[in-house]
Image (tube, grey):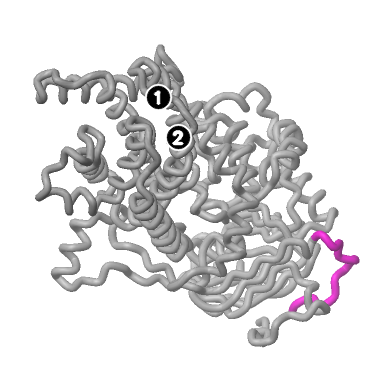
Amino acid sequence: MLSVPAAAVRPERADDDFAIRVDALSLVYRTALESRPTLRSSIRRFGRRERTVREIHALDDVSFSVAHGKVLGVVGANGAGKSTLMRTVAGILPPTAGRVEVHGRVSTLLALGVGFNRELTGRQNVVLGGLAAGLSREQLRAKYEAIVAFAELGEFMDMPMRTYSSGMYGRLAFSVAVNMDPNILLIDEALSVGDARFRKKSFRKMRQLCRQAKTIVLVSHSMASIRTLCDEAIWMHEGKLRMSGDPDAVIAAYTDFLEVDEDDPETEDDV
Amino acid sequence: MSRVATPLRPVADDEYAERHVYEPHRVGIPPLPKYMRELWKRREFAVELSRTTLRAQHYKSALGQLWLVVNPLMLALVYFVLVSILRGGTRGPVYFAHLLAGLFAFHLFSQSVNQGAKSVVKGGKLILNTAFPRTLLPISSVMTAFMRFLPTMAVYAVVHAAAGLPVGPHLLWAIPILVLLVIFALGVATFVSAAQVYFRDISSFLPYVMRIWLYASPILYYVEEVPDRYKPLIYANPLTPLLGSWSDVLILARAPQPALLLAAAAWAFGALIVGMLFFISREREFAVRL
């Protein structure tokens, strides 16, 4: 297990080697009991003195860090907090306790659907997403061609995204994430989009990014991907960091655990 | 296995250029100077979102973008007919100009608030996937409303000239009044859009609130016409100093009363500060609430 670095000490310049440092991070979801809160129901609940929210401890005292240019694999069962971890590192979800420090421009490819508006065209979505991520118009213009070329969408870029197949949707999402020229890339179970050819291509792109010494955090259920791409791995279990270290060791322990505790020991080895 | 302490290669300087620290601040407000810097850096996003929204609206209808002008004109006609009937047809072209100016300005306000209210909930997917200052969403809605407001001013200019109203440097007073109106609209829009995340029925209430607000503002009538016992009520309306001055300048061709202008400015900046602070203090929770 990793030790918790002294949180009180501000990092010195010499200690700035890491790309991502997560210190004693906890995150508690306070989910509303209903998906669409209304004034009426909250007044009614208030009258009955019921609790409005339920607390879910999605992350519990997680600490680790990733050095520049390293590829970190994250494994764990569904609901282990992997996606929450990724969104916290991306700055989307605020930590409940602890601290996350990220050095570099982050690009994300997250599991819960990319931020595309289906009514808008692919081009409009790429431009809006890029501007929201903090790119300038010039930077975007330079990247746009690369994004379209990699996604192989051609004419579809000027059609509303509701006309896209799910494979095309995924291809564009992957292409945007890897072509934003990030220092840090967060990928959440998104390596298996498109047809076999595109998967091969995205895998090749991933290896290329690894060689370019990008810092990558990769959440995957594919043990083969973790093994081939990652320098280090962590295993999340029920919001806690269960193990970290060499990918082979973590994968061995994780699959061992699955075989003991779950009926189906097979891990899907698609890329 | 512990953290790798030494980098495997020299780290390029630009990798330090962006440094993000995320710490809990559930209650309260993130460091504002940094927030404002981020906001300014991404202003192009608000512009692009507003442009995209404008292009998407009326895209499929026959009159297309012409609706931007036709819509408020029809609205003005409806109210002109209504008031003419109620008043027995004693109102002339000057009143029509007053009505039109007031309606168009009010439309700018109500559009900002109505669209702003929905902006955060509508931007859900983007909020779940990208970290950016969320105030950009209501700001973009207000921009859209303003872009839609501009062509209506061309319509007003025609009516202004046709009604024989004077044209002169006094009309320049309209600009600061418009700025205050936009600031006020932005304040209300940010407040309502954050509240909408918690109470989804707000956007259903809004059209009725806006309708009442319209009747309670000096648009269908002049401020001077209000009976004395309703005077306190009409002056409690933040839009009264704004729209009253607006009509003073455009129709009565006089400089706005300093007291009214001061009241308008107080309302505008008060609303902006309250709305923005409420929004910013809540926005980090949006990703969990959507």
Q: Which residue is painted at 22% across and 57% down in the image? A: A39
Q: Quadrant of the C terminus of chain B?
A: bottom left
Residue B166: mark: 1
Q: Is residue B195 above or below residue A203?
A: below
- Label 2 neighbour load within 10 Å: few <14, some 14-19, many 20+: some
Magenta span covers which residues?
B1-14
Q: Are marks 1 and 2 on the same chain?
A: yes
Q: Which residue is painted at 40% across and 58% down in the image? A: B275
Residue A32 lies left or right of residue B49; in this view the side is left
- Residue B2 percent coordinates (x, y): 74, 80
Q: Quadrant of residue A246?
A: bottom right
Whether tag 1 and tag 2 are in contact, CB under 8 A, the answer is yes
- Residue B208 percent coordinates (x, y): 21, 41
Q: Is residue A91 visible?
A: yes
Give the residue type at disc 1: Pro
Nearest the eye: A31 or A228: A31
Q: Quadrant of residue B47?
A: top right
Residue farthest along the right direction in this orientation: B10
**Which chain is indicated by disc 2?**
B
Residue A194 lies left or right of residue B169; in this view the side is right
